[in-house]
Amino acid sequence: DAGVIQSPRHEVTEMGQEVTLRCKPISGHNSLFWYRQTMMRGLELLIYFNNNVPIDDSGMPEDRFSAKMPNASFSTLKIQPSEPRDSAVYFCASSLASGTGQPQHFGDGTRLSIL
Amino acid sequence: GESVGLHLPTLSVQEGDNSIINCAYSNSASDYFIWYKQESGKGPQFIIDIRSNMDKRQGQRVTVLLNKTVKHLSLQIAATQPGDSAVYFCAQEGNNRLAFGKGNQVVVIP
């Protein structure tokens, strides 16, 4: 069975450029989560969606970050303009439903480097 | 706010021995707990979960123990193998989200 699929796996770009990360959740999952992982902060929840609707974006660090979920099978996380401190691994995860005792399943992440 | 913390940053274990990873959590209202394994270059992988109405749950070579009295969670890995080398995270559910611990590196010595 296909798990959560993220693209690209690696992204290297110069500061100031727009970065778009993509995620395809597991089919049938109704909740989607975006995380950022760094050595200093560990795994941080940025935003999550239930049934394609953003529920909590309090973890989004700045207005430079935005996320969308136009349909049940696709989500994007965009950074514009990007800065070197945005360098991290970004994970997408999905679950059957949030807050109901269902595990989240993670993709293999996008390793982002902003020069 | 919620926090989930681990006692030891690195655990070195001889191949074939049993491993125990410990985790303390702060949200006593949480009903659901999960252990994840993260290998280098990959995302966290679900290992096993447990609900608050249980104090022990077993999987294949893994056992999770939950002590609600002292807010403590542990993961036991039997007959540790080289493939078990990874970072292990505990997580607890609260406010419709998971709060993750900082991770515990397990190194298996062949």
Image: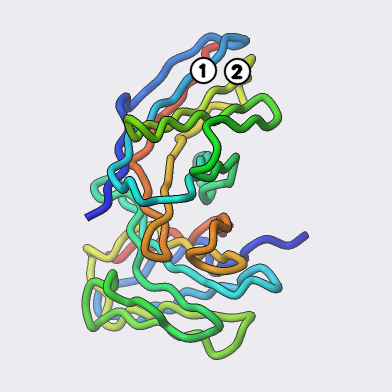
**Badge 2 or badge 1: first in the primary sequence:** 1
In the rendered image, the residue lying farthest to the bottom is A70
Residue B96 lies left or right of residue A25; in this view the side is left
Q: Is residue A104 above or below residue B107?
A: below
- Crowding near pointer 1: few (<14 within 10 Å), some, many (20+)? many
Quadrant where the C terminus of chain A is found in the figure = bottom left
- Crowding near pointer 2: few (<14 within 10 Å), some, many (20+)? many
- The picture quadrant where one finds residue B49 is top right
C-alpha span from label 2 to label 1: 7 Å
Q: Which mark is residue A107?
A: none
Chain designation of label 2: B
Q: Amino acid at mark 1?
A: Ser
Q: Amino acid at mark 2?
A: Thr
Q: Which residue is mark 1?
A: B19
Chain designation of label 1: B
- The picture quadrant where one finds residue A11 is bottom left
Horizontal and vertical percent position of residue A15: 25, 73
Q: Which mark is residue B80?
A: 2
The residue closer to the viewer here, A30 or A42, is A30
Q: Do residues under tags 2 and 1 come within 8 Å of each other at their CB atoms?
A: yes
Horizontal and vertical percent position of residue A96: 62, 67
Identify which residue is drawn at 41% across, 19% down: B11
The residue closer to the viewer here, A81 or B108, is B108
Identify which residue is drawn at 68% across, 32% down: B59
Identify which residue is drawn at 54% across, 23% down: B76
Q: Is residue B18 above or below residue A115?
A: above
Horizontal and vertical percent position of residue A91: 46, 61
Residue B45 lies left or right of residue B106; in this view the side is right
Identify which residue is drawn at 43% across, 54% down: B93
